Amino acid sequence: MDMKVKTFIYMIKEGFKGLWRNRMMGMASVGSIASVLMILGIVFMIILNVNGLAETAKGQFDSIQVYLEKDLTESQMDNIGNIIKRIDGIDYVDFLSKEQALENMKKSWGENGYLLEGLEKNPLPNSYVIKLKDISDADAVVSRIKGLQGLEEIKYYKDVVEKLLNITNFIRIAGVIIIGILIFISMFVVGNTIKLTVIARSKEINIMKYVGATNWFIRWPFLVEGMLLGLLGSLIALGIVGLGYKRIFDLVTQKLYVMIAAYMIPASVVMGNLAIIFIVLGMGIGALGSIFSMRKFLKV
Amino acid sequence: MINFFNITKQYAKGAVALSNINVKIEKGDFAFIVGSSGAGKSTFIKLLLKEIEPTNGKITIAGLDITNLSTRKIPYLRRKIGVVFQDFRLLPNKTVYENIAFAMEIIGAKPKEIRRQVPTILAMVGLSGKAKMYPHELSGGEQQRVAIARAIVNSPDVLIADEPTGNLDPDTAWEIMKLMKQINRRGTTIVMATHAKEIVDMMQQRVIAIEGGKIVRDDKKGVYGYES
């Protein structure tokens, strides 16, 4: 057998041995990693969905609607449109005729759209719909438009969008902080588990150092042990979060909340990413925990 | 083979363990380092293994300046040096054979080489019949033989022994010394720290005496020289 292969097998075997030797502490570590990842998964799902919701909402609310007075001539309307187009910070301007506006309303009312059929006269005004490059310019743009002649009303939802963005940002930051603290704690727990194996084998490590083993030769079995702990933890967390999310998604979709379900990200879309994140993070926590815990034992 | 140039070692607490010493040990030498406890013998050995750094001066081993050796390269230095300790330091859960094979596995020796080399070394130290035994089933002298076998199995240039007979009765100690001499005859340089007066006197080898951090005597065919 090739030596590299033999060494590799030795590392894996020693890693499993260490795992079995400290199975009680090992379970604590796996549990710790699993719970961290579970919380991470929940926070991650919330962030993803809130983001999705925020994006959708932003798309609907980041426009300024300028309603025009009823008795304007074509050229007067064009004139207003041209002035608006020249204002800084505007992405594009669409003219929405009152006929089109009524058509849109019918569509959005869906089954109840027939109610609008009975109208004798279209009650809706002509309007311009302004898309901004950045929602934070809304006030400036509105103040420029306000002075124009022939406007009935200007409507925009800057406050709503900003509040929504603030909430999403808060959730994101809080999530990252919570996850960071939990990762640190679980690294500490894993480190302590590995340290037990290291102490049990400190004599062996000492001898290895004197015979000329490299630090990485000594480290690998412990790294394998740490990464196995992480892998187990991440699989458990993945199972629980995955099944849990799917259940909630099905519940929301099947029951009454069709409106919310439209904004919810389906489980199948996120599961792949979640699996990668969990496994990488879990094994990373395990590996780092073991490296930190054995630093001082390698100094001979 | 081993050169100490103006070596001074001062510990952080201020104690000067070695003060400006110069030593040259040639290839194939058998050198005793003698002196009372705390004279600086251990410091001498630890400097050779690069367990500690000198405060001043330069050390070379086999032409390699080890004073400026990076931490990453220390394992490769130690592969040129075999070490034997007073307390044997064998792995209790491994057999005699496995203890020796372990030293070869660590440096990535081929399994075929291991299967050939370990029995050869076992025969040389006179333990062929005990390959499958565990350290606790052996006498102190036999355990030290295993330790010596492990130290020389990778054919190091230098064998360093720190009080190798310290835990052994005089007869057993003498057997160990015969083995050391035999290894030396095969060309391995030996540096042995000890305060076993009888052994030093009978071996008639080079004696480097350290006292108070200084070399007080360096005789080609020396004796211990004073009551220890």
Image (cartoon, coloured by chain):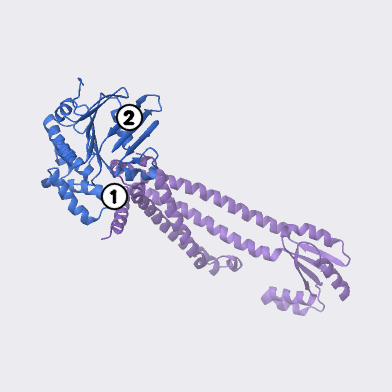
Chain colours: A purple, B blue
Residue B107 got which mark?
1
Question: Which of the chains bears the disc numbered 2?
Answer: B
Q: Position of residue B216 (x, y in %)?
A: 28, 23
| Residue count near mark 1 (Cα–Cα under 10 Å), binned few <14, some 14–19, many ≥20 | some
Which residue type does callout 2 highlight?
A: Asn
At mark 1, the secondary structure is loop
Real-space CA distance between mark 2 and mark 1, rounded to the nearest whole angstrom: 32 Å
Tell me if I can see residue B138 in this picture.
yes
Image point (14%, 42%), residue name:
B125
Residue B170 relative to residue A139: left or right: left
In this rendered view, identify the residue nearer to me: A194 or B49.
B49
Question: Which of the chains bears the disc numbered 1?
Answer: B
Discs 2/1, front: 2
Which residue type does callout 1 highlight?
A: Ile
Residue B23 relative to residue B227: left or right: right
Residue A126 relative to residue A190: left or right: right
Residue B112 relative to residue A164: left or right: left
Q: Position of residue B166 (x, y in %)?
A: 20, 30
Q: Position of residue B105 (x, y in %)?
A: 26, 51
Residue B43 got which mark?
none
Q: Quadrant of residue A65?
A: bottom right
Query: Which residue lies under the disc numbered 2?
Result: B22
| Residue count near mark 2 (Cα–Cα under 10 Å), binned few <14, some 14–19, many ≥20 | some
Q: Quadrant of residue B82?
A: top left
Image point (69%, 66%), residue name:
A60
Q: Does A193 sit above or below residue B39? A: below
Image point (29%, 36%), residue name:
B2
Q: Position of residue A38 (x, y in %)?
A: 47, 55
In this rendered view, identify the residue nearer to me: A256 or B108.
B108
Tell me if I can see residue B52 in this picture.
no
Q: State which tag comes first along the sequence, 2 or 1.
A: 2
